[in-house]
Amino acid sequence: MNVLSSNVGYPRIGENREWKAFLESYWRGELDQETFLSKMDELHLQHVKKQKDAGIDLVPIGDFTFYDHVLDTAFMFGLVPKRFHSSHEQQTLDTYFQMARGSKDAVACEMTKWFNTNYHYIVPELNDVIPTLVENRPLRLYKQVQNHLQIDGKPVLLGPISFVKLSKGYEYRDFNSIVKQFVPLYAQILSELEAAGVQWVQLDEPVLVTDITEDEIALFHDVYEEFHQSAPNLNLLLQTYFERVEHYQSVVSLPVQAIGLDFVNDQGENLKAIQKYGFPPEKILAAGVIDGRNIWRMDLEQTVNLLDELTSHISNENLIVQPSCSLLHVPVTVKSETFMNDSLKEALSFADEKLQELVLLTKGIQFGKEVIKKEISKNKKILKLFNESSARQNTNVSQEMAYIESISVERKAPFRERQNVQQQTFQLPLFPTTTIGSFPQTSDVRLQRAKWRKGEISQEDYSQFIKNKINDWIKIQEEIGLDVFVHGEFERTDMVEFFGEKLGGFEVTKAGWVQSYGSRCVKPPIIYGDVYFQTPMTVKETTYAQSLTNKPVKGMLTGPITILNWSFVRHDLPRHSVANQIALALQKEVKTLEQNGIRMIQVDEPALREGLPLKKEDWESYLNAAVYAFKIATTSVENDTQIHTHMCYSNFEDIIEAIQNLDADVISIESSRSHGELITSFEQCTYENEIGLGVYDIHSPRVPKINEMTQSIERAVHVLPKELIWVNPDCGLKTRGIDETIEALKVMVKAAKKMRSRFVVHNEQ
Ligand code: GLN
Ligand code: ZN
């Protein structure tokens, strides 16, 4: 029997993001439904064919989507929340999009992060809906591919236990019974697939790598036993990814034909488990050996050796070679990077290149290392050249890092002392008002930037344009009456890409797009070398803004952990070392700002929380490293320089200790949650530095009433000393319109004043 190659999932977006274009044209009403559907079908088939032509044996079917695969699963089971029901119509394609994007009458379903990735899925709502099988979607797609391309694909489904785990709208005590509602539906899908002659089905159960309980594992056994009974001749591949599996022995004994394990992001533990406990001889191991989360060309020899090691425990014919997870998380092809320098380009591997690597590896395992000898030596040469390049072996950086790591990274004085000095310096009123950094990036900003990038306007004209914007908004902030100003971030496209373009060791790709949610794609910069500070990055705009006003203007930087988490990171160094290099470069920016008279500096860390490892036992070391990097960046300043940070999530209780340890003078944080929850979160944990709990939600164009904002400040006053409280929106205002922004901020300033006056009156009584 042959060693099979398999793919776990393929990017949906197309080489030129055509997928995004089709979707958005359809949404705008420029494509009629029929044309839209046929274009999408064409793209789907093209992706399947591409994978087959590359030589992949098991090509995934059904991972392609019009929005998100979790939403597809919910929709397939008729889980359409009541607010999207129209009285006489069937659920249509438009219902599907309304669930994802909202309609004028119904708010969209919640969206949240897919495990520890930057992909977001639509959270299914299970409240009071009994699932039914509306359509056997995998079967339809399987047949479609078979008819058009004569290819027998491998249908992919999100497994029931992960699906229910990722859903909301039920009490955990009902978990088992809810999963069981889905079991007959899955069983029907599987038996119909079996009847249609399908050979392989991949059932994704990524929850198997999270902290799941013995009881949940027992549920897995029940559920998968039923699947096995319903489709005894179908090869079920139970797929895990993103980490080492919990309860290895139980997992590999599940009644399925094959188990997919991640051998890249498992910290070596999946291999160790196989070495220690063996692997059931009657089962097939789908070995995820090519990194589906990163963009580096694999070390061919090392990967062959890993597979060799695996085949000392598993016979060759029981091996499938595959990526560690869906290739959804990497861009489509390196071919589009026409301007990149060759040594970097050669070291990269996006989805299409990974397929080639996969096929090559499979050949090497099937016929022996000898047959891929030439490729191994070529691969070695490429990687050697790249690894030894001065970009990756920067002695200045390593010397400075060694020094930093040997000294303490504490502020010169503890917070209480700094707070006194800062109060004298800034003389801010009670409940000082400020914003998070960005102001509306209206179409004129995007247009001028595009022109400048194309060379249609000069650097000088572009800089002048930015200056004018800053000027306008300093005036606006004066009018509004804010206490602490920002310059508005008009020169930035994206808070990470902006720094990626300016720091050494980074490359920004031309077309390295990855789906973030729905049609929205991001283009993470690549950290390929040692990171270093080249020239001041934010000083010009910040000092210009400061020159226009007597109010303090906050310098605005993206923090080391957020830059790390939103980039593709080199993998020859530990992540925390890369974070420290970024932090050191940012420290230089912070110092330069300080030397240029900027006395408040905000270092944003919105991605700190989402970088948390999937397993709780790994949290501490991640958080310690994150705190350390943040402190390298921020602690070198004088006591009367005020360090701010910003994070936009409200569930911070479980990491509050780390947030406290950042020792920022001021943090602004989202707090869109209900009264009760906010109070309990502060009853349970203490936060001692200054804090702004976002007083309004910037994700909506609605201008809140003054009472809503005063109530929000009051809530904070109940649980925190009033001297610590700042007043600000809950995130940057980049996506908002100008008028609504000004109006909302005026209300915010009024609310702060109202609260202030209340306390002054109080004191005089
Ligand atoms: N300073 C950034 C802004 O205002 C922060 C963005 C964020 O939190 N994601 O846009
Ligand atoms: Zn934010």
Image (tube, helix red, strand yellow):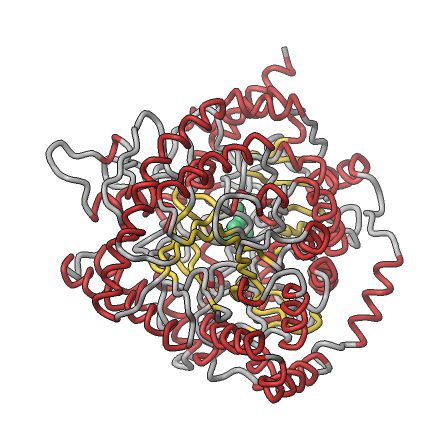
Q: Would you say residue 725 is visible in this rendering?
A: yes
Relative vertical location of residue 278 with respect to residue 296 in this rendering, above or below: above
Q: Would you say residue 588 is visible in this rendering?
A: no
Please state which of residues 581 and 177 is positioned toward the viewer in this rendering: 177
Relative vertical location of residue 85 with respect to residue 119 in this rendering, above or below: above
Residue found at the very far left of the displayed protein = 88
Please state which of residues 675 and 67 is positioned toward the viewer in this rendering: 67
> Is 498 on the left or on the right of 201, as rendered?
right
Residue at the spot 42% in from the left edge and 28% down from the top edge: 706
Give the mark count. Answer: 0
Q: Residue 492: horizontal and vertical position, in percent?
A: 50, 63
Please state which of residues 611 and 200 is positioned toward the viewer in this rendering: 200
Q: Residue 607: horizontal and vertical position, in percent?
A: 58, 50
> Is 335 on the left or on the right of 507, as rendered?
left
Q: Residue 343: horizontal and vertical position, in percent?
A: 61, 84
Instruction: Please tell me in which quadrant of the rendered image residue 591 appears.
Output: bottom right
Q: Quadrant of the C terminus?
A: top right
Residue found at the very far right of the displayed protein = 406
Relative vertical location of residue 711 with respect to residue 435 in this rendering, above or below: above
Please state which of residues 435 and 608 is positioned toward the viewer in this rendering: 608
Residue at the spot 49% in from the left edge and 84% down from the top edge: 339
Residue at the spot 51% in from the left edge and 72% down from the top edge: 358
Instruction: Please tell me in which quadrant of the rendered image residue 496 appears.
Output: bottom right
> Is 219 on the left or on the right of 589, as rendered?
left
Relative vertical location of residue 573 with respect to residue 275 in this rendering, above or below: below
Q: Residue 661: horizontal and vertical position, in percent?
A: 75, 41
